[in-house]
Each structure stands twice: as structure tokens, then as C-alpha cells.
Image (spheres, rainbow, N blue to C red):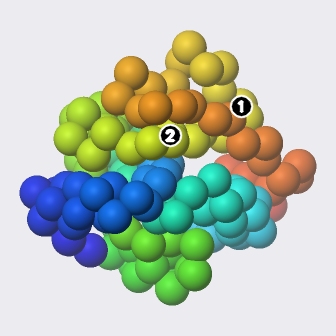
Amino acid sequence: MLPLDKLVEKLNRLKEEGKKIVFTNGCFDILHKGHVAYLQAAKKLGDVLVLGLNSDRSVKALKGPGRPVNNQYDRAFVLASLYSVDFIVIFDEDTPYEILSKIRPHILTKGGDYKLEEVVGSEFAGETILIDFVKGYSTTSLINKLK
């Protein structure tokens, strides 16, 4: 993980080299097949995949008490081991708007449960693409199954 300013410098150099930057974000609390398939699909859209990871505080704000199950550093560690993920940046805000305003990726991806007009920060990306989820996989359903 790099601080945001260093990440932006690195991405700008990669853009100058002609690399296509893809950005996605999420909580990725309990990593499962759906997450991995989604990240692989996002990576195929470009050369470099940047993952904006919700901080513990923002996951709690979005998902409620009891979440996240795994802290932000553990989640980042596991996600960094995936070949599809090139860079991870943890953000504490409720949305990655500020990060996107600085990174300005070629492509922004979100899950298929969004509508294009709902994707925060899409004005900073060259293109916004929705990626279908793998049916039957969600962190919430996994947690409910464990209960």
C-alpha cells in the first residue's frame, strides 16, 4: 500500500507509459469466489487495477455494527495477494470520491447491482463499467449462514 500522493505519482507515470488504469472499490470483508471473480473481470479491462478499500470506520457506517469482520489491514493483506490487484488504497470516507478525483482512472468499475448514474466519481473516469456479480455469493449471506 502506498499513501495516496505516492500512488497518484506512480499511476501518472504508468499512464505516461500508455498503461490503462482501472479502479474499483468496496469493503471486501470476507473474501469469497464472487469477490475474486469480480476483481479478475475488472483487471481484464486494463493493465493496472487499483482497489479502493473501505476503512473499518466506513464499513461500519455502510454495513452496521458488527462489521467489518476482518480489519482493514487484514483485508488489504489478503487482497494484495491476488494477482489481479496491483495497488490498494484504504479510504475513510463513505465513498471514494476524493480518491477518484485524484487518480482519474481510464475505467471505473462497480458491481452489477448499481446503475451507471449511481456510481460515485464516474465523472473522473474515462468510462464506467458495471460488472455482474457471481450469483449466490455475498458477504452478508455468508455471515447469515454462519449464524
| Kind of residue at disc 2 | Leu
Residue under the point 51% across and 42% down: 107
Q: From what the image shows, is residue 24 above or below residue 37?
A: above
Q: Residue furthest bottom?
A: 81
Please rate how many residues cluster around mark 1, counting C-alpha atoms within 10 Å: few if below 14, some from 14 to 19, many from 20. Answer: few
Instruction: Give how far apart the Cα atoms at labels 1 and 2 are.
Output: 15 Å
* x 44%, y 54%: residue: 21
- Residue type at mark 1 is Asp
The residue under label 2 is 108
Quadrant where the C terminus lies? bottom right
Q: Quadrant of residue 44?
A: bottom right
Q: Secondary structure at mark 2?
A: strand
Badge nearest the viewer, 1 or 2: 2
Residue 56 x %, y % = 33, 56
**Residue corresponding to mark 1:** 113
Residue at the spot 56% in from the left edge and 57% down from the top edge? 46
**Does any portion of residue 80 appear in the rendered image?**
yes
Q: Secondary structure at mark 1?
A: loop
Residue 47 pos. (x, y %): 52, 64
The one of 134 and 107 positioned closer to us in this rendering? 107
Is the residue 10 above or below the residue 45 in the image? Answer: below
- Near-viewer residue (128 or 95): 128
Is 13 on the left-hand or right-hand side of 126?
A: left
